[in-house]
Image: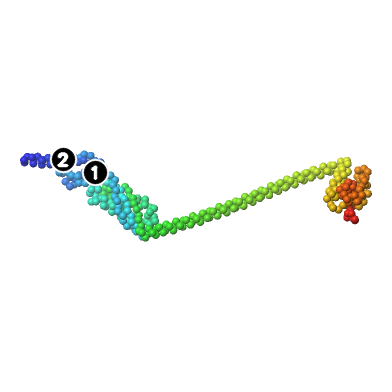
Amino acid sequence: MVGIIFAYAAAIAAILAFTRLVVVVPEQKAYVVELLGKYRRTLGSGLHVLLPFVERVAYRHQLKEDVIDVEPQVCITSDNVQVTVDGILYYKIFDPALASYGIDDYRFATVQLAKTTMRSEIGKIELDRSFAERETINDNIVKAVDEATDPWGIKVTRYEVRSITPSEVITEAMERQMRAEREKRAEILASEGVKESRINVSKGERQEAINISMGERTRTINQADGKAKAIGVVSDATAEGLRLVAEALASPGGRSAMTLRLSEQYIDRLGQILGSANASVLPEKLAEMQGFAEVLGLGAARALPREPDLERAPERAAPAARDYAREAARSGERRPRREGGEA
């Protein structure tokens, strides 16, 4: 019976000795080993053998990047506005020995450093700038905390400000300011639109007036050019006609032909007048027509109608009037008279 108990005790001692002797360290972890209470070495991932009952694993650290939630805290900006700020801190252990013996609780110490640095950075800027300069705040906090935790074997990789929450009074004031600013921008945009519209309308009217004036100028110039060309053509034609008339008058028999042509035109016009007038217009001496015709070389005098016949039919007086016109063209005497007296 005693032997069995002894055997069991020996087995348990062997198991304890084996567990103390062999240590398996997982990946991305590090074990700090002490020899009789003094730092001996740091074990990385893998299988390690310890001296039983002399060496022991004192600290176990995780080498992966870890995150700490920094609880919200009240900060005061440079313009004396209270805001509640919280964030997230990312860090990792690069020296397990320093993390074990450099400080008692590195997580708590790192969080406290992040809080104090965050309050300091928020106090340097105004409320309006704090929302727009989060990247600057994050970089400054990371730089300050990383320098402070370096003796502890801690590397702060980054810090993120999660939220900045002003008080309710400040939030209402900011909303009123935002509404006023938007209304101001809306009014400015509306006025700019009216201004642009008026400018465009005035430019359009100006361009229209310029186009109309240019059109009128072009039309006036074209009309003047047309009139000048027409006057030139008429003057050229008149000059040519006068030249031809002068040549015709200088030729033999030209003057007689001209006199005859004028007489015929005169007689035709006189016949038109006699045909349309209610009163008869007769020469003073009907006998002069015959002489007038003889002078023009038209042959023997034609028989003239009597005055009663002319009064009844004014159109019959056209041949006699034609003879009289021919005589007047020769002698230069035209003495028509109305019935019952001289004109």
Above or below for 94 versus 174: above
Q: From the viewer's perspective, is 112 left or right of 296?
A: left
| Residue 61 seen anywhere in this rendered image of the structure | yes
Judging depth in this view, the residue of 138 and 304 nearest the camera is: 304
From the image, tell me which residue sits under label 2.
Answer: 18
> Where residue 13 appears, x then y in whole percent?
12, 41
The answer to which of marks 2 and 1 sits earlier in the sequence is 2
**SS for dot 1:** strand
Amino acid type indicated by mark 1: Ala
Residue at x-position 84% and y-position 42%: 247
Q: How is the image coloured?
A: rainbow
Q: Mark number for residue 16?
A: none
Residue 35 shown left or right of residue 94 in the figure: left
Give the percent coordinates (x, y) of residue 263.
87, 46
User: At which x and y percent is residue 90?
Assistant: 30, 48
Residues packed near mark 2 inside 10 Å, few (<14), some (14 to 19) or many (20 plus) = some
Residue drawn at (67%, 48%), measured in percent from left and top?
A: 219
Q: Which residue is mark 1?
A: 30
Q: x, y percentage for residue 233?
A: 75, 44
The type of residue carrying mark 2 is Phe
Helix, strand or loop for disc 2 = helix
Near-viewer residue (66 or 238): 238
Question: Which circle, 2 or 1, is nearer the viewer?
Answer: 2
In depth, the one of 57 and 239 nearer the eye is: 239
